Each structure stands twice: as structure tokens, then as C-alpha cells.
Image (spheres, rainbow, N blue to C red):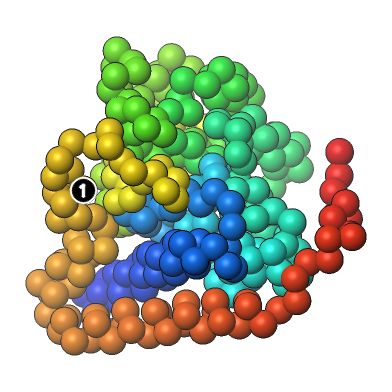
Amino acid sequence: MTLSASIQEQRIDLLRAMYRIRFFEEKATELRKLQVDVFGSLHMCIGQEAIPVGALSALTAQDRVFTTYRGRGWALACGVPPVKLFAELMGRETGVCKGRAGAALLSAADWRFYGENSIVGAGAPIASGAALAAKFEGSDAVTITVLGDGAMNQGGVHEAMNFAAYMNLPLIFVCENNSYSELTPTRDMVRSDEFYKRAAAYGMPGVRVDGNDPEAVQATVAEFAAAARAGNGPALIEAMTQRLVGHYYGDMQAYRPKGEIAEAKKHEPIVRLRAKLEAEGVSPSALDALADEILQEINTASEEALKAPLADASRVKDHIYA
């Protein structure tokens, strides 16, 4: 096998993983719209798929992931089966949390996915604890905590960064900067929206990366993960991206400038990687077949999840710890 063929296969794998996230989120949106099988608030990561896919391709099975409430893409990239995620959204007994977590609180530790958090920025201090445990255990595990650009102004995030730097923890902070803090342009909330530069104040490296390029994310995470395993402590990655949907299901997006989404769709990760593969000689029909294969996988998973029994409401307090 030539090097170019190997690289091309890796890129196809990245595209496959991004399709899986995209189609899952679109199907979840479709089911939520029906208000029959999926209820509650949904925060989709459509357009941001390259960040979890790139990051997880650079990590190992022992590493740990903590995310925001927009975390299903990360769960899928960790290897959580789509059928179990659908079951969780549907409140089914076969869900990853037995139907108790829903969309914004799910976790799946068996797949190194230690969960979402509905409190903005709250995953960072928890992830610091996981990284501290790894250090005390003497393991090579690296922890990733994911946060949005709006969370960069939360006090708990600053405390977590300071603690991680002071304790030299194997922790990577990944800021998914989609330029909106919920419904407000982030640039209207800060003097400088170059968040990666804040890392220097804590004495750790920080970089800004193209969050729509899974290979760029992969390379950056791999570099900092290796440094963390070598005992060089935490880092901050600011991944620039754009969500192609509202902040949550039902968001009318009146705050967006006209034409912004249409322009963003020209540069979103799936479009870009497809274009790169086609330029390298992969036929559009082959890529269409790949998309069709993953779409069928997702549709089958949603249908299978619907067959599972609903969670028993009388046992709602089971599996809860305080």
C-alpha cells in the first residue's frame, strides 16, 4: 500500500465518521420535530463534526472525554453505538443511561465518554478531577474537556485552567468557537475574542486551529496529547467552526446576518473533505455510496431504538448518586 493510498483511506474514515454525526443529528432533529419519540431541548452540532472526529482520531482507548450539552457528536466519535444514543433520546431502557439522561446529560463511560453537562463550562472542573486522578494513578491517560466560546468567560473554567496548569495535569481544553455565545455574537461580549491567547496567562500553550479541518484538529490534539503524556501539562485548543443550525431546536436565529448560514455551508467540514477527496481522484459516486451507507445505518439504528421498552418511571431514582 502506498503512503498516498493510506492517507486517502484515513480521510475516507474521517468523512465516514463525520457523516455518522451529521446524519444522526439530522435524524434526531426530525424525530424531535414530530414530538412523538424525542422530547425536550436539543442542541445540535451540525457543522462542527470535524472537531470531535479529528480529536478522537488522535486519542487512545484509555483517554477520557467530557463535553458540553452539545456532545452527541463527541459520543459518536468515541464509538458509542447510534442505537444506544437514539434509545437514550427516546427515553428507552436500552439507552446509554437507561433513558434517564435524555439529550443534555448523557454519559457512556464504557466508551470513554464521561458525559455532557447542562451547566455552561461545568465540565472543565470535573475533567480536572479526572486528569488529577490519572496523574495520581501514574497512568498515561489524557483528559479532554470541551467547551463553547461562551463558556470561556465562566469563573469555573478559569479556575479549572489555573488548577490544571499549577498541578501540571494531562488535560486538554478544547474550545469549540462557533462565534456565538448562545444567541449573542461572542465578539460583542469580549474585548478580544482570540481565546487561545488566554492560555499564556496560566502558563500553558494555546493555539487556534481550523475546526472545520479534521486533519488539522487531529494533528494539534496529537501534539498536545503526546506532550501531556510526557508530563508537560495542559494546553488550550481554540477550534474555529460554525454551527449550521440554531443554538437549540426551535431557535429562529433572528440574530444571524442574512446569508451567513449559506456562506458557512460552503466551508463546512463535510463539503471541504469531500472536495479534497474528489480532487485526489475519489469518484463522487463512491462518496455518495458512502453517505448512503451511513444514512441507512442511522435510519436502522433509530428504528431499532424505537422497538425497545420505555424506561420504567417507577425506577427513576435508580442509578442516581449524590
Q: Horizontal and vertical percent for residue 134?
A: 70, 42
Q: Secondary structure at mark 1?
A: helix
Q: Where residue 34 sits in the image (x, y, percent)?
A: 49, 66
Q: Amino acid at mark 1?
A: Ile
- The quadrant of the rendering that contains the C terminus is top right
Residue at horizontal 42 percent and vertical 84 percent from the top: 296
Q: Viewed as shown, does residue 6 lie left or right of 319?
A: left
Classify 10 Å Cα crowding around label 1: few (below 14), some (14-19), many (20 and above).
some
Considering only vertical position in the picture, is 85 above or below 154?
below
Q: Is residue 38 placed above or below 154 in the rendered structure?
A: below
Residue drawn at the location 67% of the way across and 82% of the way down:
307
Residue 32, position as x, y percentages in the image: 50, 61
Q: Quadrant of the N terminus?
A: bottom left
Image quadrant assignment for residue 166: top right
Which residue is pictured at 19% across the width and 61% down the height? Answer: 272
Of all residues, the one furthest to the front in this rendering is 35
Closer to the camera in the image, 137 or 112: 112
Residue 222: % across, % down: 42, 50
Nearest the camera: 111 or 234?
111
| Depth check, front residue: 142 or 51 | 51
Q: Which residue is mark 1?
A: 261
